[in-house]
Amino acid sequence: MTELNRRSACASLTAAFPVALVAWSVIRAPRLGLDESRLAELSPGARAARQRREELDRRDRATVSRLWAKKELGAGLAEGRLALLEAAARVRELDRQSPDFHWERFRAFYPGASDEERHCREAIGWARTALHAEPSRCREVTERLGGELRRHLDAGTLRLPEPDGSLALPRG
């Protein structure tokens, strides 16, 4: 066999192998009691990859839960059902629950002399988000909350309460 023929044969086999594997998995594997999930476990690293995917899915669900909770806190703050410091404390707790929370980015994004002030600003941001469709009300609420924050800063009373356990979200 010439070198060119050997290379052609090798390339043909290489190209045909995935097709044959798919055909085998569709036709023969079910007859042997092997479904797609069990076939995946036969490959090296498949179990680790599946566990990693499940972990990432769990973390994604926890992140989405925290975002929905922040959205609800923002609405409660905008509607006056929550005081600024309570909303900020709850936002802080949601941030603390995330193992992937980027504290450096948080501190760079929200201005302030302390994390307590930054969490207040984050809570105000969520209130603005809740009122995005009502610009005049959004300005009014933002001014009210900004004034409340300034009063706490000026009086030296900016202390967020500790969590009361009311945020039972999945850790992620």
Image: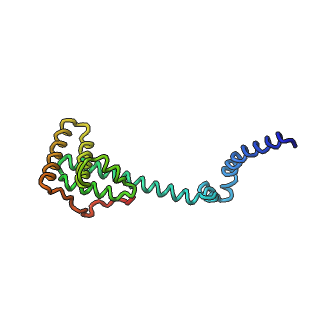
Residue pictured at 41% horizontal, 53% vertical: 61
**Screen quadrant of the C terminus:** bottom left
Q: Quadrant of residue 142?
A: top left
> In x, y percent, where is residue 31?
68, 56
Q: Residue furthest right?
A: 1
User: Residue 29 is drawn in which quadrant?
Assistant: bottom right
Query: Would you say 165 lies left or right of 158 here?
Result: right
Figure quadrant of the N terminus: top right
Residue at 52% from the left image edge and 59% from the top image edge: 51
Q: Position of residue 50 (x, y in %)?
A: 54, 57
Q: Is residue 88 left or right of residue 53?
A: left
Q: Is residue 79 left or right of residue 92?
A: left
Task: Write the residue at 18% across / 36% down.
Answer: 136
The x, y position of residue 16, in whole percent, is 73, 44
Q: Position of residue 86 (x, y in %)?
A: 21, 56
- Residue at the far front: name it: 113
Colour scheme of the picture: rainbow
Residue at 12%, 54% in the rendered image? 155
